[in-house]
Image (cartoon, helix red, strand yellow):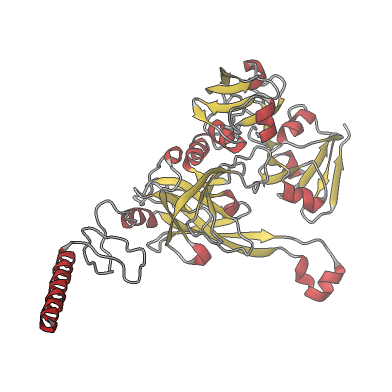
Amino acid sequence: MKAKNLISGLFMALLGAAIALFAYTKINAKPSGTFAGDSSSVEIRNADALLTSMTMQEGQIDFTYAAELTVHAVVHVRTKSMVGPQANNPIWEYFYGDGYSKPREVSGYGSGVIISADGYIITNNHVIEDAENVEVKLNDNRTFTAEIVGRDPSTDIALLKVKASGLPFVKYGDSDQLRLGEWVLAVGNPFNLTSTVTAGIVSAKGRSLGILDNDLRIESFIQTDAALNMGNSGGALVNTKGLLVGITSAIVSPSGAYAGNSFAIPVTIVKKVVEDLKQYGEVQRAIIGVNIIEVTQEDAEKYKLSEVKGARITNVIANGSAEEAGLKENDIIIKVDGVSVATPSELQEQVGKHRPGDKANITYIRNGKEVTVPVTMRNVAGNTNVVTREMGGGGIVYGARLESLGSSDKDRFDVDYGVKVTELNDGKFKDLGIKKGYIILSINGKKVKSSTEVRQATENESDLKSIEGIQANGTIFSFSFRK
């Protein structure tokens, strides 16, 4: 009996072992596995063992083509300018010497982008704004003295020209077609390190930073996470095809170095400004004659909007394009020529593509209803004429280029009005001894805030009785004339 039970137990043990062996071999035969130490037993089907080195496969992003196309067309911009004289202060001169009040040479640097084989180069206005000498160095180490063809503080764009031919250049892309998350490359000269390439994605579009000191500023930056640092200003932002989609311009940083966000001027704005400067020497600024602000949640509820987006009109300029087209205060502009505008900066970007005399279809919401009307855009003088230097337009009065006072100068001189002399050519102001950097506060006893008001106060440059202002060193000047 005991023998029978022993044999029976042995048989069952052998049978169990056979079943376990069979199951084990079947499981190992399946093309699947689990990650070691993973209690969730994630199954990996059709997995192959791969070495961890990387070879570019079809469909993956390759930056080498775009980098090679761009790096030879980005130049190093170096500037020299004279700063001072400082205000005469005997205490400062006692400590720092007699030379403290004398003009001092200051060097600057940035980047630029060649856009044509015959030597036209785009950079930022703030890179060359006060420069008396501009030099560009190419990637092949050739150096040229550059002429400033024109500049536009409203968009922070300047155009340079060097005497050369057969230069490598970057072709224009289309910044309107950029999508969030799309890869872009930034090429420039950070910290004087030439030919530096960084990569990132488009983080946002239509950003306004409030960094341009100009009443007619257009800020609609492309935001990326491509690393930029001091010296990148004026460099190229290109897509993976090597096409120019923006001009790198700014960073937001608590330390002054790259902190995760960088900003570029869209090429749709850049291209139009450059064409104007080449053709006319002045930007043909189109306006529709309204003051606008961002739409809020309260606005959306009050004005029956389905979305919190658009630009709300706070004021319609008398006898302007918008008034002529029937737009009114509190209308919400949502489209320009069918292109949606979610913010005031996006509206400025779309309007900034146009010249005075151009027509555009403006779509707005009033009382919950969507309306589209044609608007003929005008210049800052209120007409559709082309503005040229020879006509005294573009802010030039008595031979001086006058720009509305920016916030930094308002804070520095503690004034809330005035115009700044940013360029001085032959004319009455130069004859009077007025210099670049002077602030003009009043003309013929009238306070002025723009070149247009200066022109009006002098009856279109025909009558100059008095002028008051502030010199660059902070001292007051005043002239009066008798007939």
Above-or-below relation of 477 to 230: above
Residue 375 appears in view:
yes
Residue 38, horizontal then vertical, whole percent: 35, 68
Q: The N terminus is located in which quarter?
A: bottom left
- Left or right, residue 19 beside residue 222: left
137 and 404: which is toward the camera: 404
388 and 480: which is toward the camera: 388
Residue 289, horizontal then vertical, whole percent: 66, 26
Quarter of the rendering containing residue 208: top right
Residue visible at 76% across and 34% down in the picture: 454
Residue 450, horizontal then vertical, whole percent: 73, 36
428 and 395: which is toward the camera: 395
Residue visible at 46% across and 45% down in the picture: 180
Instruction: Report the number of discs.
Output: 0
* Residue at the far bottom in the pictured view: 2
Above-or-below relation of 262 to 100: above
415 and 26: which is toward the camera: 26
Quarter of the rendering containing residue 14: bottom left
Quarter of the rendering containing residue 343: top right
Above-or-below relation of 358 to 249: above
Residue 435 appears in view:
no
Q: The C terminus is located in which quarter?
A: top right
Residue 140, horizontal then vertical, whole percent: 37, 62
